[in-house]
Image (tube, rainbow, N blue to C red):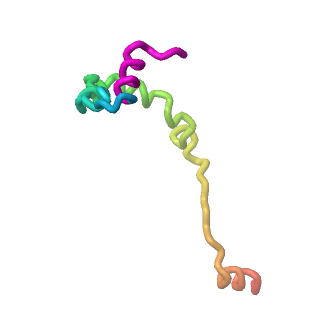
Amino acid sequence: MGKSLAKKKRDKLIREGRRNPEENRSFFAFADLRSRRTKTKAETLQKQKHKNRLSNQYDEDNRFFTFKLTKDIINRISKN
């Protein structure tokens, strides 16, 4: 892509040893000044609408259990 005329002028000023005009820009030139708002209740509910459909609320009898077998428990089981 070609350089814009403004970019060419900035580069020329830098080559000549003068101040870079980009350094004159204020902090607000780089700030994101878009206004933001919090979501409405309807928007929040719509976002949650399809989540957790595969959870246990429909099938409460199917539960997953995890347990840890220690050496003591294994020894007691094997003795029986």
Q: Locate the C terminus and report the quarter of the image it occupies.
A: bottom right
* Residue in view at x 26 percent, y 28 percent: 25
Viewer-proximal residue among 68 and 28: 28
Q: Quadrant of residue 42?
A: top left
Residue found at x 24% / y 32%: 27
Q: Quadrant of the N terminus?
A: top right
Name the residue at 28% across, 23% down. 34
Depth check, front residue: 12 or 58: 12
Q: Is residue 23 magenta?
A: no
State the image quarter where residue 18 is shown.
top left
Q: Is residue 78 above or below residue 5?
A: below
The single residue placed furthest to the front in the displayed view is 16
* Image x and y of residue 70, in percent: 64, 79
User: Where is residue 38 drawn, in percent x and y?
Assistant: 27, 28
- The image shows residue 43 at horizontal and vertical percentages of 36, 23
Question: Magenta residues, as a range?
Answer: 1-14
Count how many numbered circles sit on residues in the image: 0
Overall secondary structure of the magenta section:
helix
The foreground one among 29 and 65 is: 29
Residue 68 placement, left or right of 9: right
